[in-house]
Image (cartoon, rainbow, N blue to C red):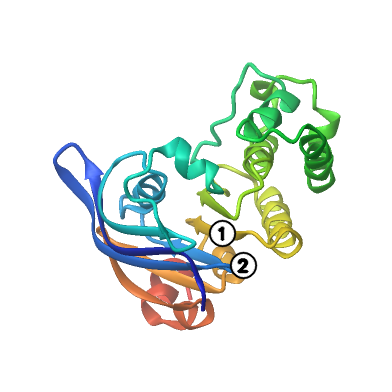
Amino acid sequence: MTALLDIRGLSAGYGRADVLHEVDLVVAGDGVTALLGANGAGKSTMLRAVCGMIRRTGIVTFDGRPISNLATEEIARLGIAHVPEGRGTFQRLSVIENLQLGAMPRRDTAGIRADVEKIYGYFPILERRQNQAAGLLSGGEQQMLAVGRALMLRPRLVLLDEPSFGLAPLVVRSLFAILARVRREEQVAMLIVEQNAALALALADDAYLLETGRIVLSGPSAQVASHERVRSAYLGT
């Protein structure tokens, strides 16, 4: 497996308290990795640490380049897009304005226009709502917009934080089907933090289980899904 994102000995937290403790994690250049764990395990902290949003120690490399000391904006320019929990859309701006903001680091005007149309192909409802304020969209539409805005960066890696949170089951299934299509068509790697373990494991190639800030289980997703610890606590089987 060729690592796109390689994390070694990562500790991170807020103030003086560490939430993550000496974490190792790898995301393949053409793969999807799921990060499972209970609330409070440190999953969102992991994504924020990768993006340079919080205090961190350890070694984080992206495509062989150390990024541990880079600012969040510099990390984004390298091709890492973050879809935060709660979607993070700009509520007063329109759908099209939100998408255009996702492409701010880019200067290829024609490419940006083409990518907006590509996003509308993935999420047709966004085209119909393109002039509507993001705050007036449904929860599912806002999540689609958040994913679409991240893709406007033309990222090599997308970090997704609880993409199914607060969404109806039908919307969740549709969203994960689109994520699978995006992975296939755009050849973009993903690191997904997700409470819905069954959906995350079905999409992912590899998976990690995080408990109280430490990785306690990792491997191919099928292998992790079959582990008794995961089956009983996260899959209900």
Residue at position x 65%, y 37% in the image: 149
Q: Is residue 80 above or below residue 197?
A: above
Report helix, strand or loop for mark 1. Answer: strand
Q: Position of residue 132 (x, y in %)?
A: 76, 20
Tell me the amino acid under the disc marked 2. Answer: Leu
* Disc ID at residue 229: none
Tell me the amino acid under the disc marked 1. Answer: Met
**Who comes first in sequence, dot 2 or dot 1?**
1
Q: Position of residue 10 (x, y in %)?
A: 27, 58
Q: Quadrant of residue 134?
A: top right
Q: Position of residue 114 (x, y in %)?
A: 83, 40
Residue at position x 59%, y 64% in the image: 199
Task: Name the residue furthest left.
Answer: 16
* Disc ID at residue 203: 2
Report helix, strand or loop for mark 2. Answer: helix
Q: Nearer the viewer, residue 123 or 198?
A: 123
In the displayed structure image, the side of residue 9 where residue 182 appears, left or right: right
For mark 1, what is the residue? 190
Q: Is residue 112 visible?
A: yes
In the displayed structure image, the side of residue 199 where residue 127 appears, left or right: right
**Which mark is in front, 2 or 1?**
1
Task: Name the residue furthest top.
Answer: 92
User: Dot 1, crowdedness within 10 Å: few (<14), some or many (≥20)?
Assistant: many
Q: Are marks 2 and 1 in contact (CB under 8 Å)?
A: yes
Q: Is residue 159 above or below residue 52?
A: below
Q: Is residue 83 visible?
A: no
Q: Tally the marks.
A: 2
How far, Cα to Cα, is label 2 from label 1?
Answer: 10 Å
Q: Position of residue 140 (x, y in %)?
A: 67, 40
